[in-house]
Image (cartoon, helix red, strand yellow):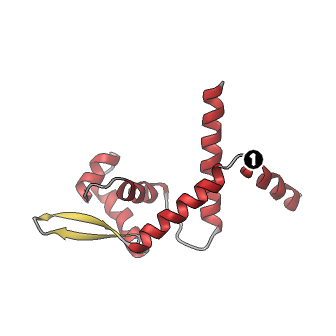
Amino acid sequence: MAQASATDHLVATLRDTVVSMVRRDGPDLSARQLGVFLTCYLNDEAHTVRGLAAELNVSKPAITRALDRLGELDLARRKVDPMDRRSILVQRTLKGAAYLRELRSIMGEASAPNRGRTEERAGRRAVG
């Protein structure tokens, strides 16, 4: 029972976070793009396209497409590895670090007790 309650809370936090991210001005990332972004920003090791593909268990072209979008938004950038010119390194950016801080803040608000339920009720009153 406690496990279901904890899981329900996590799902509600995810929902509230995604809704907040969609409603605000700023980039909208797909689940894959967000997965690549978070992997790059939450793991301190150097990241390569090949390594990200292996870690996330997706194809290199899928990682490349996600990085194309992250690059357009200046949330990450690619650079040829000077030690191995066949390898592409993924680098963090200042804008990406700011995006992660914003995401953490939104998640913190979304996980606060009763926050989501209160907003949900307010939203229903506004619609109904």
Return the x and y of residue 102 as percentages of the image width and height.
54, 65
Q: Nearer the viewer, residue 27 or 5?
A: 5
Q: Is residue 5 above or below residue 61?
A: above
Residue 81, percent from left and from top: 16, 66
Q: Residues within 10 Å of mark 1 (few under 14, many from 20)?
A: few
Question: Where residue 85 appears, x then y in whole percent?
Answer: 11, 67
Amino acid under disc 1: Asn
- Total numbered circles: 1
Answer above or below: position of 47 versus 24.
Answer: above
Q: Residue furthest top?
A: 1
Q: Quadrant of the N terminus?
A: top right
Residue at the image point whose x is 43% and y is 54% from the top = 35
Q: Which residue is mark 1?
A: 114
Q: Quadrant of residue 124?
A: bottom right
Q: Secondary structure at mark 1?
A: loop
Q: To which quarter of the image does residue 128 belong?
A: bottom right
The location of residue 111, given as percent across then percent down, is 64, 49
Q: Residue at x 86, y 62 (%)?
A: 126
Q: Is residue 114 left or right of residue 24?
A: right
Say above or below: 95 vs 14.
below
Residue drawn where x is 63% and y is 69% of the image? 24
Give the side of residue 104 with respect to residue 41, left or right: right
Residue at 46 percent of width and 58 percent of height: 34
